Amino acid sequence: MMTQVGFLPDETSSFVGRRAELARLDTALATRRMTTLIGPGGVGKTRLAVRAARAAADRYPDGAWWADLSPLYDDALLLPTVSDAVGLADHTLRMPVEALCEWLSDKRLLLVLDSAEHLRGPCSHLLAELITTSPGLTVLVTSRQPLDTRGEHVVRIQPLPVDGAPDALRLFEDRLRAADPNADLEAPGDRAAAADICRRLEGIPLAIELAAAGIGRHTVAQLATRIGTRFDAPVDAEDLTASRLDLLADDSLWPRRHRTLRTTIGWSHELCTPLERLLWARLTVLRTDFDEATAREVCTGGPLTPDAVDRALQGLVAQSVVQWDGTRYRMLDTLREYGRMWLTELGEERAAADRHARSFLGLARRAHDGWTGPDQISWYHRISDTHLDLCAALDHLLAHDVTAAQEMAGLVGFFWACCGHLSEARGYAQRALGAGPVEGAHLTRLQWVLGVAALLQGDFATAEKYGALCTATALYDRDDDGMLGATYLSGLTQLMTGEPAAALEAAERVLRMTEPGSSGEGVSGEPGASGDSGESRPYGGSGEAGEPELSGWPGVPGESGEPGGSGESAHRLRCRLITVFALTALGRLTESLPAATALRRSCERGGEYWTRSYADYQLALIALLQGRPEDSAAHARDMLAGKHRLRDSFGIALGLDILAAAIAAQGAGAQAARVYGTGHAYWRMVGHPQRGTPELGAVRENCELQARAAVGDEAYQRAFERGQADNAEVGLAAALQSGLQP
């Protein structure tokens, strides 16, 4: 659910009561820099934090942002998780905490960290730094215990009142009707029995919800009797269920007699069938939300057949152990914690981790295969949304199956290096290379990931090193795709360091050598020479501005009837992109225009967006250099739309600079200044000053000169600062609106 600016989770069920607590939290958020909402598991901290944050969001110009810490088993991914939550996609070599502090330093936003109790020390240290360096930052934390951070204001949340207040009973009735719209408490004695249940459960919301879910197997009166019998029975200190559930209690906050929640969870566990209990335990290995297919892959085994997983999953949903939001499943952290204890008791931890790692290795393989197909966007989002599970799988494989880890780090790093998560891409690739011998395509991919991540972080020396290593490995293995990938890496490094002629020569040569169906010698043969004179036509055809001759170009049907290039590999498409960039940088626009047009068509036929959007970027730059600013703006907006779908902040920053220049060339100085300011906001998001190939320097300078000349320095500065201060998403949405604005 998007707020005006920021992100807060959806509320998928009714919110009951808590007026006094909401008022206290509202006051705390208005007057305190850091508030920690504490209480035992299941008391409703997360729901209350969502509601309070949503109510306060309008006070924060830079939004309200949510980071769920419950999937983190240690603090290794704490900084990346918080950085993702506030929209930072740092592309630099700085320490992550330094980048995060700088990103937040001038922002006025609300940051919510949910479920911090298992990371109290690391969270306390991080927040101490953030609050010190970010005067406009307000933090709300949910935890079972205070973080003991200096300046922390603690708000304790109690269970719902059960005597003299209707909230607990209303929650029971709401959840009853959510499970069965025809259910009610109108039968004689039902309302009194429900009130007794709420009293027995001491008003703890999760306990009440679990009890209401049990009505499908009992009447309200029967449920009240069963709960009464269980709660009146003495607790056996030797009882396995009771002793393990004791771990869910926090004795520093609640007396030991408050066994209500852990007893209710144990009772819900007993109501489950044996296969439902087994599934409950096995699902706890998942770090993020999941679908049915993932549940089957991760949990199938022994008595849990794929069909049995489906049936057991629906049983857990019916009992509120697993939540379903219409598209994905998730398990509350308190219930996950209980299931994890039973997974340990069953001795299945290693087997579950093996299945989990195998499942997400399979996901990485399928995503890699689908990168150039029509589902590229959905595959990228799938990789992005399962980031924590992929990291967990890689950690497990690095410890137990190095070969699989090396394969997976190369496959996943391909996505992470293209569209963000550079630190993880580089870190896991380095760990995989250092874990043991590796050869073939796995080695080439790992070298490629390291090189591209280094390049995007501005580490050109490392990028050049790994480009050379990739080339050597691919030549030795006679690997066409590896050679294309190496050439892309080396060529992009050369473009960024002002050597477009060398990039063009290498890309042309390797594209010829690896042409599908060609009679050339391939990468194993002696490479031929290729000139880079002004007369060179690497793809045949010359074409005038705006009317490229496409016959005979790769990806475009020619007179011979050869099919287009919609089946080209990702590395081949990117290698063709290098030729387009290089031709433009060399000023050979009558060649780069048809080359970019042909490349875009190849990508469009195959459903490929990442390279296609950079072809749009080149078309925008070419049109601008040829004096066609209207066409340039249209191509720039196409590029921005594609990069927005891929969540590629670096690409968006580049596109906004070109769009601003195209608008400035049309005389709309204030609009150009605002778009240019939004571009600067995105450059800050990736942690770099404006980046790109050297020829962009003149384009940016000319943009500012034209915009200032059109409206004057004062109006330019106001519009630029407005764009820079806008939330990035809001500014991008304004930039994507076509047409000139007065």
Image (cartoon, rainbow, N blue to C red):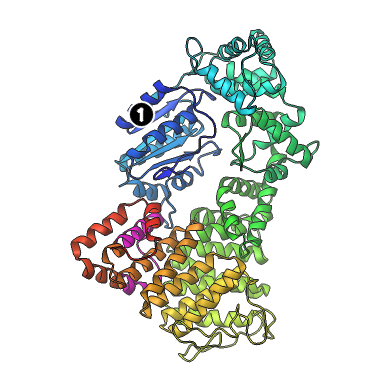
132 or 278: nearer the eye? 278
Residue 318 included in the magenta stretch of the image: no
- The x and y percentages for residue 254 are 50, 16
Amino acid bearing label 1: Asp
599 in relation to 344, above or below: below
Residue 693 on the magenta segment: yes
Judged left or right of residue 443, residue 296 is right
Measuring from the top left, give residue 478's x and y in whole percent: 67, 75
As drawn, 351 above or below 486: above
Left or right of residue 143, residue 57 in this image: left
> Percent position (x, y) of residue 437?
66, 60
Quadrant containing the C terminus in the rendered view: bottom left
Q: Is residue 248 visible?
A: no
Q: Main secondary structure of the magenta part?
A: helix
Q: Which residues are magenta?
A: 674-700
| Residue 225 occupies quadrant | top right
Residue 382 vertical placement versus 42 (above, below) = below
State which quadrant residue 23 falls in. Answer: top left
Question: Residue at position x 57%, y 64% from top?
Answer: 447
